[in-house]
Image (tube, rainbow, N blue to C red):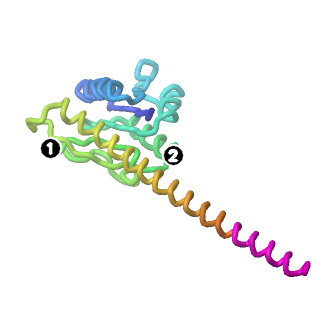
């Protein structure tokens, strides 16, 4: 079961609503979902939120409204934990553009949504879950290919060792005659 940490700017009701809805959709899709501990702290990255990020396989952040320093801290912390920008997804509003700039932009994969598009929030949130599921399928496919290659390599090594053992036995038999 994959784990997703969903975060948002604490001063944005809209982002919070999206994060909670994504949390619900993700949980019903079979993911273990986490939200930041905003009850104890909306200004600093507390230990509980760090722990939740540390347990996550993916981090999704809504960055549609004005940027809060805590979400930058969460992205930086997530990148240190995951060290893979494809596992950190930042959702931007297509109309407003990007509100994260600088080095931090190399720590995540951006996705753009249009709030005014007729897809609706649920379809956008489902698209995010589908994106993560597709990444997981690709990752599992790569693992299967790697396992097949490892098996083939092991079989080739076993065959080579078998030939070597056969040659050793033949050589021993030739020496004893």
Task: Name which residue lies at 34% across and 41% down.
Answer: 132
Q: Position of residue 175 (x, y in %)?
A: 89, 81
Answer with the quarter of the image where residue 71 lies.
Answer: top left
Residue hosting label 1: 95
Q: Position of residue 57 (x, y in %)?
A: 45, 39
Segment colored magenta: 161-177
Task: Name which residue lies at 19% across and 29% down.
Answer: 122
Which residue is nearer to you in this view: 52 or 147? 147
Q: Alpha-carbon distance for marks 2 and 1? A: 30 Å
Helix, strand or loop for the magenta stretch, by majority: helix
Which residue is nearer to you in this view: 134 or 57? 134
Q: Looking at the rendering, in which quadrant would you find the C terminus?
A: bottom right
Element type at marker 2? helix
Q: Residues within 10 Å of mark 2 (few under 14, many from 20)?
A: few
From the viewer's perspective, tell me whether residue 54 is left or right of residue 156. left
Q: Position of residue 138 (x, y in %)?
A: 37, 50
Residue 82 falls inside the magenta stretch: no
Residue 174 falls inside the magenta stretch: yes
Q: Position of residue 140 (x, y in %)?
A: 43, 47
The correct choice, above or below, for 69 with respect to 40 in the image is below
Residue hosting label 2: 80
Which residue is nearer to you in this view: 108 or 149? 149
């Amino acid at each position: 079961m994959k784990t997703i940490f969903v975060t948002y700017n604490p001063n944005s009701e809209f982002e919070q609503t999206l994060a909670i809805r994504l949390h619900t959709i993700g949980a019903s899709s079979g993911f273990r979902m986490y939200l930041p501990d905003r009850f104890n702290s909306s200004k600093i990255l507390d230990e509980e939120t760090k722990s939740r990020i540390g347990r996550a396989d993916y981090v999704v952040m809504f960055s549609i409204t004005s940027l809060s320093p805590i979400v930058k801290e969460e992205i930086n912390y997530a990148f240190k934990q995951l060290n893979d920008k494809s596992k950190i997804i930042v959702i931007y509003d297509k109309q407003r553009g990007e509100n994260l700039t600088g080095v931090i932009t190399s720590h995540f994969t951006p996705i753009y949504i249009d709030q005014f598009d007729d897809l609706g929030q649920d379809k956008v949130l489902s698209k995010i879950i589908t994106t993560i599921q597709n990444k997981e399928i690709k990752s599992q496919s790569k693992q299967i290919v790697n396992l097949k290659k490892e098996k083939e390599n092991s079989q080739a090594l076993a065959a080579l060792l078998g030939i070597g053992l056969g040659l050793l036995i033949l050589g021993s038999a030739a020496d004893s005659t």
